[in-house]
Amino acid sequence: MLTHETAPFHAVLFPHRSLSRRGFAVLMVIVGGTLGFAALRTLALGAWPVAVFSVLDILLVWGAFHLSYRSGKAFEEVTVTQDEVVVRKVSPGGRVSEHRFHTAWARITINRREEEVVRLRVGSHGRSIVIGDFLNPGDRATFADAFADALIRSKRGV
């Protein structure tokens, strides 16, 4: 049996995060400093409700990025062998779902809008799953081409 180390095609897809952890720390220092200063200034002027909302703004920015980084823990692992296509999806919470399709029956559906790949699906026998939904259109198109090529090669026995 082929493992992902010896499989003809193996890819691990991760959601893109444009801001690194260090960048997030810098952003929070800037946001916290600016809004913290505004909170202290309005508090000194006696407008304590404005200070409360400034602190809430800081917490909301932090919370939004926390949720974004949490969702970034999700990934998909796609393996194509001569016998099967295996798609393993791992949720941000660590829940794993695995989908298997026999290579001979597996079909790829690529929905495009102009030059962009909007959605990529693989399926057979009436069931299908979406792959790489969290990727940007350019990465999704590159992956779709490589995946389709790998599936064609595996069907030909190459």
Image (cartoon, helix red, strand yellow):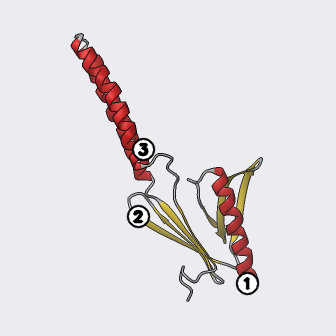
Quick check: 132 above or below 88?
above
Q: Mark 1 sits on what residue?
A: 158
Per the model, the C-alpha gap separating discs 2 and 3 is: 29 Å
Q: Residues within 10 Å of mark 2 (few under 14, many from 20)?
A: few
Q: Position of residue 46 (x, y in %)?
A: 22, 11
- For the C terminus, give its image quadrant: bottom right
Residue at mark 2 to residue at mark 1: CA–CA distance: 34 Å
Type of amino acid under label 3? Gly
In the displayed structure image, the side of residue 47 where residue 17 appears, left or right: right
Q: Residue at x 46, y 59 (%)?
A: 74
> Picture quarter containing residue 125?
bottom right
Quarter holding the N terminus? bottom right
Residue at x-position 64% and y-position 56%: 139
Toward the viewer: 78 or 108? Answer: 78
For residue 64, what is the image quadrant?
top left
Disc 3 crowd, CA 10 A, few/some/many (<14, 14-19, 20+): few
Q: Which residue is mark 2?
A: 95
51 relative to 134, above or below: above
Q: Secondary structure at mark 2?
A: loop
Question: Left of 129 or right of it: where is 107?
Answer: right
Q: Residue 114, position in %: x, y? A: 77, 47
Question: Callout 1: helix, strand or loop?
Answer: loop
